[in-house]
Image (cartoon, grey):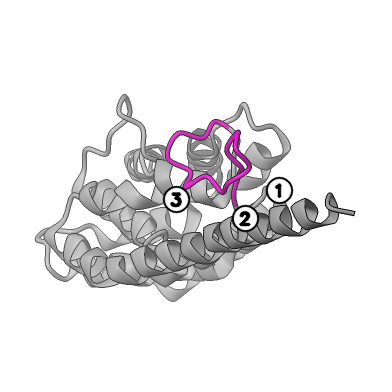
Amino acid sequence: MKKEIYSLLEKFMLSCMEDSAHDKEHVYRVLYNALEIAKTENNIDYDVLIAACLLHDIGRKEQFENPSLCHAMVGSNKAYHFLIENGFETNYANHVKHCISTHRYRKNNLPQSMEAKILFDADKLDVTGAMGIARTLIYIGIVSEPLYSLLPDGMVSDGENDNMPSFFQEYKYKLEHLYSVFYTKKAAEMAKERQKIAVDFYNSLYHEASSSYQNGKNELNKQMDSSDEF
């Protein structure tokens, strides 16, 4: 890709990024991960891959303002129109559009081209390991969601069957299951290296929170029982 084209795409991407959990550094990490994965695959169209990586989250603002919208669909259309308006060929714009529209995990809209599969994998890699934990915590802070919910008995839920959003619920619903969804061997290997960090963090946080409630409630009950004697 020519430097001037990269700069054009990067400038447009930067003008669209406002979400701190899906910021420009996330975009760069996705791009760099994608390039690392692409080295292990054949016949990659790097012009398509780089453009799709740079522009894959440009629809985030619209989704944040209106949660009924899908940022992948919004972003793919924005990217397509931007490319066409700047003189890129229709086939190229359509390929980039496909990559972006399928980078979000949806069973009815799976990536077909190798460039789309690499973008999908690179994006999912950034939700694995320590980085995935950190980004998830940033996001739940932005939308004011709690770390965990409580069970009917007042104890900390592990998130497994929660309906209310929380970090634990997001971990059990999404983060825990990411490690088997990759299309490329390289991405799966990279994710596997990160998995233990995420598991250890979740287990440690759950243990600290649940033991605090368990021990603290027992002690509080003792104190209240002793006060009833007077």
Q: Residue at x 62, y 55 (%)?
A: 139
Q: Which residue is mark 2?
A: 139
Q: Residue at x 64, y 32 (%)?
A: 67
Camera-nearest label, 2 or 3: 3
Residue 64 sits in quarter:
top right
Q: Which residue is mark 3?
A: 171
Magenta stretch prevailing secondary structure:
loop
116 left or right of 135 in image: left
Q: Amino acid at mark 3?
A: Tyr
Q: Amino acid at mark 1?
A: Val
Q: Could you tell me which secondary element the residue under label 2 belongs to? A: helix
Query: Rounded to the nearest whole Å, what is the CA distance between mark 2 and mark 1?
Result: 6 Å
Mark 2 neighbour class, 10 Å CA radius: few under 14, some 14 to 19, many 20 or more:
some
Q: Nearer the viewer, residue 11 or 37?
A: 37
Query: Rounded to the nearest whole Å, what is the CA distance between mark 3 and mark 1?
Result: 16 Å
Q: Which residue is mark 1?
A: 143
Give the percent coordinates (x, y) of residue 100: 41, 44
Q: Is residue 171 above or below residue 68?
A: below
Mark 3 neighbour class, 10 Å CA radius: few under 14, some 14 to 19, many 20 or more:
many
Q: Residue at x 12, y 68 (%)?
A: 40
The C terminus, quarter of image: bottom right
Q: Which residues are magenta?
A: 148-163
Q: Is residue 1 visible?
A: no
187 left or right of 86 in image: left
Mark 1 neighbour class, 10 Å CA radius: few under 14, some 14 to 19, many 20 or more:
few
